Image (spheres, coloured by chain):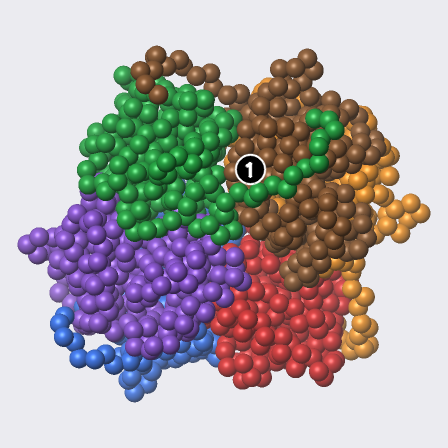
Chain colours: A purple, B blue, C green, D red, E brown, F orange
Amino acid sequence: MIAIINPNASVSMTEQLARECNALSGLHHQLTFHRCAEAPASIEGYSDGVSAAYWVAHKVRQLESGPTPPSAYVIACFDDTGLDGARELTRAPVLGIGEMAMHTATLLCQKFCVMTTLERSVPILTRNLHHYGLASRCAGIFASKVPVLALEQDPDSYQRVLDAARQSLELNNGEALVLGCAGMGQWVRRMEADLSIPVLDGVRIAVTFADAMVGLGLKTSKVLSYQFPEVKAAEPTPTRG
Amino acid sequence: MIAIINPNASVSMTEQLARECNALSGLHHQLTFHRCAEAPASIEGYSDGVSAAYWVAHKVRQLESGPTPPSAYVIACFDDTGLDGARELTRAPVLGIGEMAMHTATLLCQKFCVMTTLERSVPILTRNLHHYGLASRCAGIFASKVPVLALEQDPDSYQRVLDAARQSLELNNGEALVLGCAGMGQWVRRMEADLSIPVLDGVRIAVTFADAMVGLGLKTSKVLSYQFPEVKAAEPTPTRG
Amino acid sequence: MIAIINPNASVSMTEQLARECNALSGLHHQLTFHRCAEAPASIEGYSDGVSAAYWVAHKVRQLESGPTPPSAYVIACFDDTGLDGARELTRAPVLGIGEMAMHTATLLCQKFCVMTTLERSVPILTRNLHHYGLASRCAGIFASKVPVLALEQDPDSYQRVLDAARQSLELNNGEALVLGCAGMGQWVRRMEADLSIPVLDGVRIAVTFADAMVGLGLKTSKVLSYQFPEVKAAEPTPTRG
Amino acid sequence: MIAIINPNASVSMTEQLARECNALSGLHHQLTFHRCAEAPASIEGYSDGVSAAYWVAHKVRQLESGPTPPSAYVIACFDDTGLDGARELTRAPVLGIGEMAMHTATLLCQKFCVMTTLERSVPILTRNLHHYGLASRCAGIFASKVPVLALEQDPDSYQRVLDAARQSLELNNGEALVLGCAGMGQWVRRMEADLSIPVLDGVRIAVTFADAMVGLGLKTSKVLSYQFPEVKAAEPTPTRG
Amino acid sequence: MIAIINPNASVSMTEQLARECNALSGLHHQLTFHRCAEAPASIEGYSDGVSAAYWVAHKVRQLESGPTPPSAYVIACFDDTGLDGARELTRAPVLGIGEMAMHTATLLCQKFCVMTTLERSVPILTRNLHHYGLASRCAGIFASKVPVLALEQDPDSYQRVLDAARQSLELNNGEALVLGCAGMGQWVRRMEADLSIPVLDGVRIAVTFADAMVGLGLKTSKVLSYQFPEVKAAEPTPTRG
Amino acid sequence: MIAIINPNASVSMTEQLARECNALSGLHHQLTFHRCAEAPASIEGYSDGVSAAYWVAHKVRQLESGPTPPSAYVIACFDDTGLDGARELTRAPVLGIGEMAMHTATLLCQKFCVMTTLERSVPILTRNLHHYGLASRCAGIFASKVPVLALEQDPDSYQRVLDAARQSLELNNGEALVLGCAGMGQWVRRMEADLSIPVLDGVRIAVTFADAMVGLGLKTSKVLSYQFPEVKAAEPTPTRG
């Protein structure tokens, strides 16, 4: 079983995730979908991310101690919220949709553009990009200025995101487009048709590759970085707090 | 007032922080000390960090909504746990002891070494180092393999850390030593005497510079990255969770 | 159908590839195996690579103009010989075993080591590593000094490669091992058992992911870098050569 | 006592420096101000810098051999003219206003812009920025094309610099502004009010932090890079020159 | 004797090369000119490059086994097609016109622009630029969109390339122009007059420096990377192909 | 005429330079040799460099205003002391022996080692290396711990430098050796024979290439970075100093 964790609290976004993933054919493992009910309704900026990462870790611990721990995890926020913390808590592979979309883009072109939601997400994604090592292959991370929750609700959103994407690609010689928010995944085919270049949705890619990785027997390394958490020495009774 | 937040739950470590900082002379602002009682007893690895960052944000929100919000914050863990999240929640400057020790080291030498506790912290600190931009000035981040909580309790700890530091400096041409854990701050003078090079303790540096930054009127930018969190649009009543 | 191209001329290595790939379960597409009969018997160094890249392009052109062009290609040499040239010649995705092993390693650990055959391959792989962007995630590329063709024939090869791998991992804090030659793929399970960390064989990974990418409808971008070759203007009759 | 060295010969700029620094409250050490009378009247380009660096070293030697060597030095040119040479000549900490403004900016935002005077200074500052390691945190170094000496004398200067700053910040998503010339320090409050983001003046920051560093007992490392100059072996009598 | 190899099949371009090089005065060695008759008529993109590299290696092998092997080689395509492969096959120095123009540009200015032909060449040249290490000194690689073969034949080409160069230099603060195609070498003096900055033609530079390197006795290192190709172990008789 | 400037005051080192350069055959221009009589006797560390750079600029100004300004300059210290300042003062090309040796090494191998004199020079050369962009091609800069002036006088120097070079090359897979001090140039042939790899002496290379550059008509760009120094506005009479 593969657990897809939506790091935010949104029910509708989790439902949309489930619809998209359940439409994937050829998977070898069952999918389960989880939202983080106590996390913010969307992840926009650092403090949302801090909160969501906490609840992602909580969810992973919960699933790991359950009767059938997942064979793999997908973290379904383009920020890859809480990815490293989650990897520490399990032997199963854990994939972020942001990293999977961006790594895969480098297999299809020399330079990709990322289209995200708000400007405030750009430095967060940029730091991830540098950590993954893919900065030299990214023609830019751009914000459409359409907030996450408007992606579902505002009928003009598609056109605004498409226009922003087209302009970014042209000005920066982008050869493929990475959708920089799980909430944009619904548009992947439509946008690919409109732009005539590969458009990458991290959700489908991460779920499919997680399924493949289980088949290959690939697991998270438990040496050094991702070894299980330390057991803490007990502290003498506190005298004040 | 300057709030020093220990991101972990340890009472004794918070007391030690207070002793060290209260011994600083010439400060212009009062200091208050805070631990994160629900966080782990020490921060060793990613999942400890995820948890502590959550409680740091919680503490900052609490202090910001209190009667006299601090003029500045210091986050007293060498991992700079939750630093960006905290900056988003306040206009006051927020300094991490890790960043302050490493930035300051570049003002005193060309290449510094960092001595931290466990190997598992090295990739976390390395990522910070790259994000701060200081990687080209660091001769290496090394682990003494003495866990955080043993620093206080084990009488042999000092010698083991000193030996590890000396070897790292010699092999890598280090010109200054950065203490890579708040718990080592007690040793700064002794180790400087033993090594005959500058030894930097981020706690003292961050508190002193936070005090100076308040005097200079320097505040966190509230444009783009660190603007206050978004107010979330309400979601229609969930039908399942 | 997915075409696996061995860029060298070796029949036995191609047969070994076929055995390993045909043992993969759960693939959705048929596999065909191709060697480059006019290329060198193994790819060791730049001029071998230049020759093999030529024959890889030749093979791709041949397959593309055949009755059933492949849905995806895998180039089964760890140097990713002729990868960019091949991508230019087809809309199908083309994956190199080197890139796939190294990208995947970053999903399982923070720092991986690569164990290749001869020292002369190290600068070639290093350049690839930098181009893929993964240099900051690689703890080192090391040569076992066992030549490619000896991997099959010399009974001591396994032990020599294992010893070299173990030493490299320990000295460089490697958390996973990437097998840096298609000819080592036969050892992946045995070496994983001996080292107790993830061991990555690019062949299995690339074939499985190519199969998954076809399912996802991901194709090579035909904009800018990988657009089909230019049609050349005719030159006036030469007067000398 | 803290010595503030203006690397150029300008009396009026030195007087302005003194006015600004003497207005700082809360310092623990007395300030002395020094110009380099034989250096150029302003530092614009490489050869001005070479000359000024020479006179800065001369001034430091003079002060070091005087009756009360300074406890710290500030080099008050945004190019950080002669900084490394000065550090070699003393155990006291030596801070450049360029480095201090740029390091501090990274504590308040993710990306800062620098506004300097002439285009010819941009490559010089860029090289410093890379050496300090802060390039990844700088959204750009821009020239207002207002020469140093016009900053004081031309009443339109403020508006021209402000317009150039505003444009640079907007086009490059800058979150704070660093004033790239000591002569702009007079405008720090006014510009902060006009731009509504942090504006950093290296002079005030460097003097305040130098004062704090003395209190912390931080000194220049005298190992390797900044050890005192070599004593030269005598050369046999020259036979020609 | 210095062999100038044109990696493409064009007779007229080879003749133009010969005219330009034979006009150089002061060389100490005779020049011979060679085209790769089986290669494409021009090198535009990866698959052209793969093919041309093959024929360059073939030509070098041919010349090396001839009666008077060259003292040095120049590869006269701005992509430096097959450069590393060629170096493996000879002790003589082998220079690419792309690398020579770009290295030399850094000796004359801080930032140079490159003007090449088609957009598809930009990622290829960018990868070379990074491998040579010169990326931080390049203000940009720009495409005039005039194809190689039109450079000779279309009378408007000069003006279009000049306009594109001027715009690139102005927008990016370029201080020198590198001509990014051997076919532009005919314009070097005219363009230098029109732009009033240094214009660098890799052909003349590479030939002159190759001539100088022979005089200095500088040869390709035959250790590790560029050692002569391995002699391959024989494979047992194939049982299928 | 080509002016070779020794940035230090040493007569014997200048004489040695003259001997080595006058032995070069095939140059098209006359050579003149100049020492900086007021500079230190050798350049070891930052403050020596600051002083020498001043006198290099002085010498260039003197030569430029003389009756026959040089057609090119070579700065004969491996630190490339005062190189940028010198370029600002002339249209003639100015080459440093450090940059020329290191650029040229990348044409002969993938990774070179530099052998310099004292440890304190390593960070200075490292900064140059990064500025030139060649860091990724350098296997390391190593110090023999033999001071500059001992190179001439101490009979054991050769063996000590050779041993240090051999060890550095072996441990770091160096493929060529760059001599990191003008004073080692006397040993270039002997060391090449002893090490069996290319050994590069920047003096011979820079002089030969300067001679070639004059022939090619290549000149320093006078746009932006290296434009001639600004003419300074006059300051009102000083009232204090």
Res A148 → quadrant:
bottom left
Counting from the top left corner in percent of width and height, residue A86 is at 23, 56
Q: Which residue corresponds to the image point at 37% horizontal and 38% vertical from the top-left?
A: C69
Q: Name the foreground residue: E201 vs D177.
A: E201
- Give the quadrant of the N terminus of chain C: top left
Q: Name the foreground residue: D156 vs B107.
A: D156
Q: Name the foreground residue: D184 vs B31.
A: D184
- Give the quadrant of the C terminus of chain C: top right
Q: Residue furthest right?
A: F67
Counting from the top left corner in percent of width and height, residue A45 is at 35, 70
Three-letter code for the amino acid on which mark 1 is drawn: Asp
Res A84 → quadrant:
bottom left
- Horizontally, residue D115 falls left or right of residue B19, namely right
- Horizontally, residue F189 falls left or right of residue A180, namely right
Packing grade of label 1 (10 A; few <14, some 14-19, many >=20) is many
Q: Residue furthest front?
A: C67
Q: Which residue corresponds to the image point at 25% horizontal and 30% vertical from the top-left?
A: C20
Q: Which residue corresponds to the image point at 35% horizontal and 21% vertical from the top-left?
A: E241
| Secondary structure of the residue carrying numbered label 1 | helix
Q: Residue furthest left?
A: A67
User: Does residue D226 appear anywhere in the picture?
Assistant: yes
Q: Residue furthest bottom?
A: B67
Counting from the top left corner in percent of width and height, residue A152 is at 29, 73
Counting from the top left corner in percent of width and height, residue B54 is at 25, 68
- Which residue does the numbered mark 1 point to in the structure image? E48
As drawn, D87 above or below B11:
above
Q: Name the foreground residue: B155 vs B136.
A: B136
**What chain does badge 1 belong to?**
E
As drawn, B237 above or below C154:
below
User: Does residue D30 appear anywhere in the picture?
Assistant: no
Q: Which residue corresponds to the image point at 58% horizontal and 84% vertical from the top-left?
A: D190
